[in-house]
Image: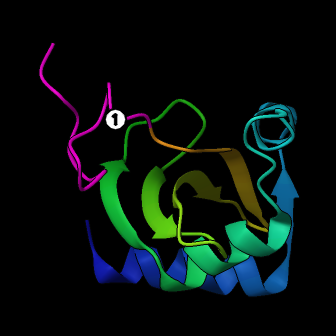
Amino acid sequence: MSHDFLNLVRKKATEKMLFLPHAVRQMSHPGRMITTAEVRKILFEGEVIEDYPEDVRGHSCLLLGFGNTGRALHVVCSPKDEYLAIITAYNPSETQWQSDFKSRRKK
């Protein structure tokens, strides 16, 4: 994962963000209620924990950050020519992620 890619993600986020339908559904789930401000916070303060250069939707990455209440959040995004696509945003589950929310648990 190059630092240049993270810079591109952040540059596109300052220009325009497009929340894909899946992201809107995940963010508005009653148990989550993730705000666009929290997504923006993760994009600018979070860290890339997984890189998906071969993603069929285009090069994308998974960022970990902490929302306004300190809760861990994951955001998957992909920079496009004219915007940053927000693919999904969710609260990582401790059943699927290690306690630091950076590494997946072994199945």
The residue nearer to you, when weighing 79 against 67, is 67
The extreme top residue here reads 107
Q: Is residue 42 left or right of residue 12?
A: left
Residue drawn where x is 57% and y is 84% of the image: 44
Residue 70 among magenta residues = no
Residue 102 lies in magenta, yes or no?
yes
Secondary structure under tag 1 reads loop
Q: From the viewer's side, name the closer residue of 90 and 63.
A: 90
> Where is residue 5 shown, x and y percent of the image?
42, 73
**Quarter occupied by residue 34:** bottom right
**Residue that label 1 marks:** 94
Q: Residue at (74%, 66%) from the top-left corner? A: 81
How far across and down, in percent of the image, does residue 52 sit?
A: 37, 44
Vertical placement of residue 33 versus 80, above or below: above
User: In the image, is 16 to the left or to the right of 81?
Assistant: right
Question: What residue is at 73 percent from the left and 43 percent from the top?
Answer: 32
Percent x, y for residue 7? 48, 85
Classify 90 as above or below 34. Answer: above
| Viewport quadrant of the N terminus | bottom left
Crowd tier of the residue under label 1, counting other residues whose Cα lies within 10 Å: few below 14, some 14–19, many 20 or above: few
Q: Which of 99 and 12 is in front in this view?
A: 99
Give the side of residue 28 with respect to residue 45, left or right: right
In the rendering, at what x and y percent does residue 10 appear?
A: 59, 82
| Range shown magenta | 93-107
91 left or right of 107 in image? right
Reply above or below: 11 against 13: below
Q: In which quarter of the image is the C terminus?
A: top left
Asked whether 102 or 76 is in front, the reply is 102
The majority secondary structure of the magenta stretch comes to loop
Q: Residue at x 57, y 54 (%)?
A: 75
